[in-house]
């Protein structure tokens, strides 16, 4: 049987052992640890490498496939003649207010006004660094015909902001949206946006297929045992986006965020079911943008590159992008 989320007493739960998010007591424990610890200072704002994006407007050709990393988990995909954006967050803070909360260390590589007309928006879950009210409203104005796709019950948030055309999917559920086949895939994470709404909406990754090409967006996730199943059922993929950051301290973060070594294992699991196909290009996401956890901001790609080399994966299949960088998927 495929892995599915459990829905009990009005809340979703990941099906794997030790997957329930930490409570308030552990949050206080982590806060005390952070206060006592000596952490590597953040680099200066906007000091990570950047690149000029190479975006086709209004749309690339149906046979073209490019990806542009805007920052964190926001990626613009141009393939199958469509413009698809993942978890669009363009605000300065991942927070309910713009005067407090985690501030961007690196600005978005472009503004919403710089985007081409968006056809499909993929929303993985409701956390503030993935679902941003201001960005949703601005995309609605800029691309009023966009189709929106998210996990179950995400409409409880975005419909009040003006999103009317939202397709909600359960894990393994799929739909053809504007000619693109999209499936929601399992993720080990949780949902919460305010007091009292923990896990009242689902979280997920996405498999996207257009014109015979396939992409995988892992969303926000810890490592879990269903990634090989995702690869077998939804692959082989041409392009995958896997998070590598926000993982320390491990006692707190291991049930919600993969570390770089686990991100490489996610990749290996995804490709295991298709040994005769070319390995997909992997874009490392979810790092270098917001200070969310305790590791040094520049550590995730270093550890990912080291592990990638250690296990003998082809060096040209790991993409540690510059902010704004566009690459063709071949």
Image (cartoon, rainbow, N blue to C red):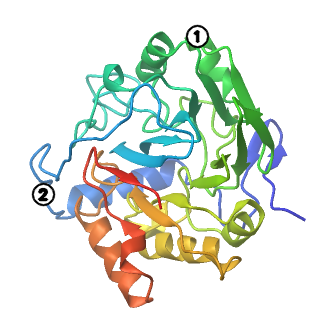
Give the answer, above or below, for where 221 lies relative to 279: above
Left or right of residue 271: residue 4: right
| Residue in view at x 68 percent, y 52 percent | 212
Give the answer, above or below, for where 150 lies relative to 237: above
| Residue in view at x 36 percent, y 53 percent | 327
Residue 153 occupies quadrant? top right
Outermost residue toward the left? Answer: 44
Name the residue that disc number 1 marks: 162
Q: Residue 324, image x and y in percent?
A: 28, 44
Depth check: give the residue in front, 52 or 23: 52
Total numbered labels placed on residues in the image: 2
| Residue in view at x 34 percent, y 52 percent | 31
Residue 41 is marked as 2
Q: Residue 40, image x and y in percent?
A: 15, 63
Q: Residue 261, image x and y in percent?
A: 44, 76
Left or right of residue 93: residue 222: right
Mark 1 crowd level (few <14, some 14–19, many ≥20, 10 Å Cα): few
Depth check: give the residue in front, 86 or 57: 57
Q: Nearer the viewer, mark 1 or mark 2?
A: 1
Depth check: give the residue in front, 71 or 33: 71
Residue 114 is marked as none
| Residue in view at x 23 percent, y 55 percent | 35
Which secondary structure, mark 1? loop
Give the answer, above or below, for where 180 lies relative to 160: below
Q: Is residue 72 visible?
A: no
Q: Is residue 171 visible?
A: yes
Among numbered discs 1 and 2, the one appearing first in the sequence: 2
User: In which quadrant of the rendered image does the N terminus lie?
Assistant: bottom right
Which secondary structure, mark 2? loop
For the residues labelled 1 and 2, the Cα–Cα distance comes to 40 Å
Mark 2 crowd level (few <14, some 14–19, many ≥20, 10 Å Cα): few
């Amino acid at each position: 049987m495929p892995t599915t989320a459990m829905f009990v007493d009005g809340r979703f739960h990941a099906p794997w052992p030790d997957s329930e998010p930490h409570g308030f007591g552990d949050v206080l424990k982590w806060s005390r640890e952070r206060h006592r610890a000596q952490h590597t200072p953040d680099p200066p704002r906007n000091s990570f490498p950047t690149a000029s994006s190479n975006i086709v407007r209004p749309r690339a050709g149906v046979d073209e496939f490019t990806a542009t990393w805007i920052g964190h988990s926001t990626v613009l995909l141009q393939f199958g003649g469509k413009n698809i954006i993942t978890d669009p967050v363009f605000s300065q803070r991942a927070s309910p207010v713009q005067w407090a909360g985690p501030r961007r260390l690196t600005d978005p590589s472009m503004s919403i006004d710089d985007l081409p007309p968006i056809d499909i928006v993929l929303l993985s879950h409701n956390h503030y660094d993935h679902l941003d009210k201001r960005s949703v409203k601005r995309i609605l104005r800029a691309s009023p015909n966009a189709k929106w796709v998210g996990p179950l019950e995400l409409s409880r948030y975005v419909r009040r902001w003006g999103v009317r055309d939202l397709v909600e999917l359960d894990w393994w559920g799929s739909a053809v949206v504007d000619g693109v086949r999209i499936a929601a895939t399992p993720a080990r994470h949780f949902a919460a946006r305010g007091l009292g709404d923990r896990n009242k909406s689902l979280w997920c990754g996405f498999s996207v297929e257009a014109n015979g090409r396939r992409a995988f967006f892992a969303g926000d996730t810890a490592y879990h045992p269903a990634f090989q199943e995702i690869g077998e059922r939804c692959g082989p993929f041409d392009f995958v986006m896997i998070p590598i950051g926000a993982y320390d301290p491990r006692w707190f973060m291991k049930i919600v965020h993969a570390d770089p070594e686990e991100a490489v294992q996610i990749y290996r699991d995804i490709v295991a079911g298709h040994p005769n196909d070319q390995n997909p290009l992997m874009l490392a996401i979810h790092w270098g943008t917001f200070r969310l956890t305790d590791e040094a901001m520049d550590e995730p790609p270093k550890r990912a590159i080291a592990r990638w080399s250690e296990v003998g994966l082809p060096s040209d299949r790991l993409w540690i992008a510059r902010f704004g960088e566009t690459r063709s998927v071949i």
